[in-house]
């Protein structure tokens, strides 16, 4: 398994962030050819400059999606970490935040995945796509309407895309993380927002980035037999 991704081209949209960095590190160690997409944090992305191809692109925009995929002419895999917590300061902000959430959390990732599938099909590549959702798409968390609804839509669209791509052996799956001590969840953990899940024994610990990296690697494996699924990496929280 450690040799099966060697030389294969994998695009990681948002792969320089908290969750993405663990996957990036793992794939590079296995010899994959990695293309990293980032939206704005050039300083953070710079640490990968010597080992991966860096592309600054906003996948909410058509040009950004094309630029990212054009950098991987031999595309085998796509992982989309990009997302936005869609938090609002007041009710007046809801319409604009909801529109942006739709673009970043649903439209951009799904359109990117569709284009990736089209390119793989055109070159008869049997590949893998992994999209990212959230525990909030699988359980009811008050106050998460603007964010969770888009991620729930993403899960359903990904399963449809998996069905459409099955004859070409292009696998499409979704990872739905729980409370992972990185990225968007990190400030919430620091504030004590999720302490009750530990205190009540609902989960044994907060998730680690390595938990997510293992799941992504499993779904990228060329000989994998899984498609059209949502894998909850949440310690059982959504149970």
Image: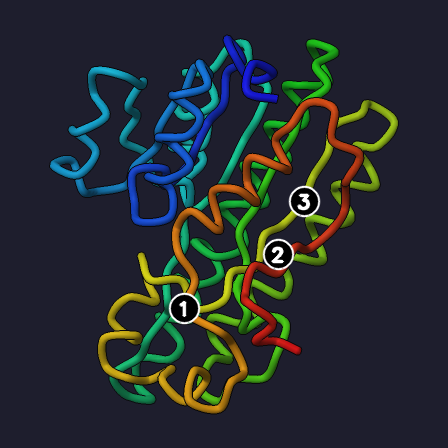
Badge 2: residue crowd in 10 Å (few <14, some 14–19, many ≥20): many
Q: Nearer the viewer, residue 166 or 94?
A: 166
Q: What is the CA distance from the residue labelled 3 to the residue labelled 2?
A: 11 Å
Residue drawn 55% across the image and 67% down it: 235
Work out which residue is located at the far left of the displayed protein and give it. Answer: 43
Q: Is residue 178 left or right of residue 230?
A: left
The tag on residue 141 is none
Q: Earlier in the sequence, mark 3 or mark 2?
A: 2
Q: Secondary structure at mark 1?
A: loop
Q: What is the CA distance from the residue labelled 1 to the residue labelled 2?
A: 24 Å
Q: Secondary structure at mark 2?
A: helix
**32 lies above or below 25:** above
x and y percent of residue 239 in the render? 66, 78
Q: Quadrant of residue 83?
A: bottom left
x and y percent of residue 234 in the render? 54, 66
**Front: mark 1 or 2:** 1
Residue drawn 38% across the image and 42% down it: 20
Quadrant holding the N terminus:
top right
Q: Secondary structure at mark 3?
A: strand
Q: Residue tagged by mark 2?
A: 154
The tag on residue 206 is 1
Q: What is the CA distance from the residue labelled 3 to the residue labelled 1?
A: 23 Å
Q: Residue tagged by mark 3?
A: 173
């Amino acid at each position: 398994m450690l040799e099966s991704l060697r030389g294969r081209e994998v695009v990681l949209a948002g792969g320089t962030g908290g969750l993405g960095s663990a996957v990036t590190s793992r794939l590079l160690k296995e010899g994959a050819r990695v293309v990293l997409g980032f939206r704005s944090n050039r300083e953070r992305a710079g640490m990968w400059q010597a080992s991966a191809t860096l592309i600054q692109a906003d996948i909410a925009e058509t040009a950004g999606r094309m630029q990212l995929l054009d950098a991987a002419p031999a595309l085998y895999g796509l992982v989309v970490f990009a997302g936005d917590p869609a938090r609002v300061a007041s009710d007046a902000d809801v319409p604009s935040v909801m529109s942006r959430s739709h673009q970043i959390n649903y439209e951009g990732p799904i359109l990117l995945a569709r284009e990736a599938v089209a390119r793989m099909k055109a070159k008869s590549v049997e590949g893998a796509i992994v999209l990212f959702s959230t525990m909030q798409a699988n359980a009811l968390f008050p106050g998460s309407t603007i964010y969770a609804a888009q991620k729930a839509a993403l899960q359903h669209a990904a399963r449809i895309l998996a069905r459409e791509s099955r004859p070409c052996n292009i696998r499409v799956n979704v990872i739905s993380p729980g409370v992972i001590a990185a990225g968007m969840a990190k400030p919430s953990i620091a504030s004590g927002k999720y302490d009750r899940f530990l205190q009540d024994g609902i989960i044994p610990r907060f998730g680690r980035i390595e938990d997510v990296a293992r799941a992504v690697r499993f779904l990228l494996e060329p000989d994998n037999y899984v498609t059209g699924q949502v894998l909850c990496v949440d310690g059982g929280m959504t149970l």
